[in-house]
Amino acid sequence: MDDLVEILGRERDLPDEGLRALLTDPDTTEPLAVAARQVSRAIFGGRVWLRALIEWSNVCRNDCLYCGIRRSNGRIRRYSLSREEILSCCERAWATGLRTFVLQGGENPAAALRLADTVAAIRSAWPEAAITLSLGELPRETLRLLREAGADRYLLRHETATPAHYASLHPAEMRLQTRLDCLQDLRDLGFQTGMGMMVGSPGQTAEHLIADIRLMQAFRPEMIGIGPFIPQRDTPFADRAPGSAETTLRLYSILRLIFPSANIPSTTALSTLLPGGRIAGLRAGANVIMPNFTPAPYREAYTLYDGKNAPRVESAVQIHNLLKDLSAAGFEVTSSRGDYKRYV
Ligand code: SAH
């Protein structure tokens, strides 16, 4: 196994059977993490970027079978933050030293179009901050307006690269190809573009994960968002088993070795499943953490999966503790924007 890790580190690729072995063998978790950490250190110098996550709305037109804010979930209170509320989240994040604001929400094209004004307001109030959006699939024209308003980056996980698996996770009207076309639009419009998938989503096999890696090798995303699937009680997948934290960690490492300079967050879903997961993710090769800056009254309504918000509300005290934990683990938090830089 150590040979495979070494070859992956050197070639930044492996044939399918090598990837399969690394993905499925628990004994590889640690050697992979050691190798990935070395690459992260070489590229990022032990630095970690914090991005402020602002969950701006849970109104969604989609009905993804795994997701708690799916439109047919009648048990959550729907909300959208006002422009003033969003700007005050940014204010707090900026004052805390964060230099990227991430606006994430349900898919709602009309609201996304209206959000362009807010993006422009953020852009003019904080010219030096990076603005990331994660608003689902939108028409190219809307994406263009958001880009012109000042957005720099866009996260749109492809969720799974295998069409039949995609169909088992989404309602019939959703198509993998539409999502991929949207990713291409984002790239064409000059967004730093993020893709990714859940680990252990219902029906997922190692072959699906290998197909995900192959798709990302073809697209070369600037950001990669990966987290374990966690069931949400009001969805059709309420009774499914969650994904594995260990496999998620191995994937962080594999992705770091294949995509040395990609921005890879250690995601909230991982830390929900695994105490200390944020730091474990960084130690496996991730370089970004996304503390939650959504105002407290709305957090419990942005319930993508169970357990998400309860113990992990990000008060000022908790940000302070996070900074302490990071420095104790040997990471240095930086106040640069952390844009993607191609690895040479
Ligand atoms: N609506 C936007 C962004 C919000 S959802 C979009 O479609 O991109 C953000 C991500 O949360 C999704 O891409 C999905 O991968 C993840 N997610 C949704 N439900 C989840 C669950 N039950 N467990 C883990 N991750 C989940």
Image: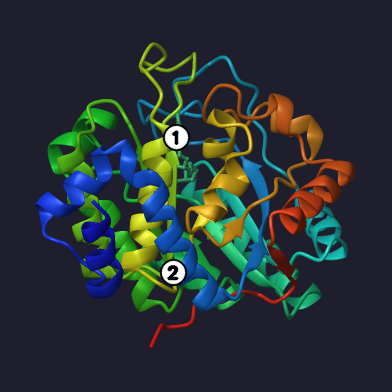
The verdict on label 1 being within 8 Å of ligand 1 is no
Instruction: Examine the rendered structure and indicate whether residue 173 appears above or below residue 105.
Output: above
Farthest top residue in view? 239
Mark 2 near mark 1, Cβ–Cβ under 8 Å? no
Q: Label 1: how many residues lie within 10 Å, few (<14), some (14-19) or many (20+)? A: many
Residue toward you, 316 or 165: 316
- Report the coloring of the rendering: rainbow
Picture quarter containing residue 128? bottom right
Query: Quadrant where the C terminus lies?
Result: bottom left
Residue 300, position as x, y percentages in the image: 69, 26
Left or right for 249, reference 117 = left
Q: Which residue is pictured at 41% across the width and 83% down the height?
A: 343
Residue that badge 2 annotates: 262
Query: Can you see residue 161?
Result: no
Q: Amino acid at mark 1?
A: Ala
Q: Amino acid at mark 2?
A: Ala
Residue toward you, 15 or 339: 15
Q: Which residue is pictured at 36% across the width and 31% down the height?
A: 64
Residue that badge 1 annotates: 245
Mark pair 2, 1: CA separation: 21 Å
Q: Which residue is pictured at 62% across the width and 41% down the height?
A: 57
Chain-order first, disc 2 or disc 1 = 1
Residue 149, position as x, y percentages in the image: 60, 74
The verdict on label 2 being within 8 Å of ligand 1 is no
Residue 171, position as x, y percentages in the image: 27, 30
Q: Which callout, 2 or 1, points to the residue nearer the camera? A: 1
Instruction: Examine the rendered structure and indicate whether residue 135 appears above or below residue 234.
Output: below
Instruction: Examine the rendered structure and indicate whether residue 116 appears above or below residue 23.
Output: below
